[in-house]
Amino acid sequence: MLFATVDPDINVTSIAGGLGIFYLLLATMNGVMALYLWQKAKRPQAALVWTIIAVAFVIMAPLAMSGDPYWVPQRPYWFKELSMLLSGKTGAVVYSLGTTLMLVVLYVFRRFFVQPLVAWSLLNAALLLMGLCAVDKNFQAIVTKPDNVPIVALVFLLGFFTWLGTAKAVKNDDRIRQGLPPLEKLDDEKVLVWPDLVYTELICMIAITTLLLVWAILLKAPLEAPSNPFKTPNPSKAPWYFLGLQEMLVYFDPWYAGVVLPSLVIFGLMAIPFLDFNKLGNGYYTIEQRKFSYLVFQLGFLELWVTLIILGTFLRGPNWNFFSPLERWDPHKVEVLNNVDLSQYFWIGLLGKALPHAPAGSSALTELSFILKREWLGIAGLAVYFVALPPLMATTIFRRMFVKLGFLRYMLMSNLLLLMLTLPLKMVLRWTLNMKYIVHIPEYFLNF
């Protein structure tokens, strides 16, 4: 037996058949890879390795289909304990820093990770981990929810297309370094709209329609009961494509998180090609020739949008608390959030005084003077961040860029970048110091 006692969170009977089919599909997938390595790539040793892995998945399939919790492959208990690092407020910090570190490692060592067998190994590891965790009833409740099934698929599709684009960019960078044209130049023959393009689109349309029909038959629609103001869902989540926006609303006021910041991120990413003085990299994949644009876009898209969607889908539970993917979503779990403004840290915490407030009946000018006195530290901090920091960067890390862009384009680019970075900075301040607002002016509904 694999385990002497059964974990109370293990639930196999409801997914035994599907899990067995899942392992058979993994076995078939790796068997095809082994055949390709043996016949086409002429790499018998690698083919033997993946054959052994395929056989291992074949053995795991009947064990999963048996429905016996003693024999079914499942995640080890220590992994469940390790996953608890993603629970609570510390989980947000671990998740944020972990995803950032992962993206940095993938970028720095991209030449290693774009190798087909390395990427194939990571894909197998991710699918195996998902299969081992699928027997956990808490993980099942999250992943098999009809709303979340397409998000799981999108995560794998995003990983595949990111790998594909990066692999092509690495190949082109190597070719350019050798004085060769990019791969796109080798196949730049014109293609006719009819019949080539339309015929391909027709086949894709039929395939997607078939997939949606099968999906609609096998997966129940996520329809809920009629709206009831006395019984609201907990948690009440936006559609997946707005979960990143909903996460932003935790850290900023609606006027900024719902309108200003998303617009700045979108238009800022759109403005990169017009602000960037570099004319290389047009029409072909490359990283070396457009590092700045590549890094900014990946930061804005992957770190400030995709990771927030994943966080809101799999880690945000009842009462909008953080839960581990293997943790039961307990609606009675309440974490004390002692949110403090920067002005409170300064006046109450540091000076031991009450916050300055204008006397009742004061004029607008007097009230404004008290507001400036109360919030001077936050206003000064924002002024340094948005006014003093761009010139400082122009004389240091962005010196060459400032010379080539010019004053106007550089200031626009630097301020868009700083505005985009306000999101991760505010998230870190909220998680570590319970910082709610840097500038808090409720008199005019102006908070930041």
Image (tube, grey):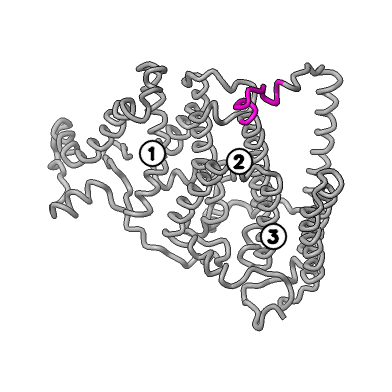
Quick check: marks 1 and 3 in contact, CB under 8 Å?
no
Residue 146 position in % (x across, y down): 68, 53
Reading the chain from its start, which is encountered first: label 3 or label 2? Answer: 2
Which mark is in front, 1 or 3? 3
Q: Which residue is drawn at 53% across and 56% down?
A: 315
* Residue at which label 1 appears: 422
The C terminus appears in which quarter of the rendering? Answer: top left
Nearer the N terminus, badge 2 or badge 1? 2
Q: How crowded is mark 3: few (under 14 residues within 10 Å), some or many (20 or more)?
A: some
3D distance between C-alphas at marks 1 and 3 = 37 Å
Secondary element at tag 3: helix
Is 183 contained in the magenta span? yes
Label 2 vs label 1: CA separation? 31 Å
Q: Which of marks 2 and 1 is in front?
A: 2
Separation (CA) of disc 3 from disc 2: 24 Å
Based on the picture, tell me whether residue 245 belongs to the magenta stretch.
no
Q: Give the range drawn in magenta.
A: 174-185
* Camera-side residue of 269 and 126: 126
Local crowd size for mark 2, using a 10 Å CA cut-off: few (<14), some (14–19), many (≥20):
some
Image point 84% across, 50% down: which residue?
38
Looking at the image, do the residues carrying marks 3 and 2 touch, with CB atoms under 8 Å apart? no
Q: In the rendering, which numbered label is found on residue 111?
A: 2
Looking at the rendered structure, the kind of residue marked 3 is Leu
Instruction: Indicate the amino acid at tag 2.
Output: Arg
Q: In this view, does 312 lie above or below 253?
A: below
Question: SS class of the residue under badge 2?
Answer: helix
Can see residue 223? Answer: no
What residue sits right under mark 3 in the picture? 128
In this rendering, the answer to whether 210 lies above or below 286 is: below
From where the camera sits, is residue 341 visible? yes
Amino acid bearing label 1:
Thr
Q: Kindly give the residue lying farthest to the front in the view shown.
A: 178
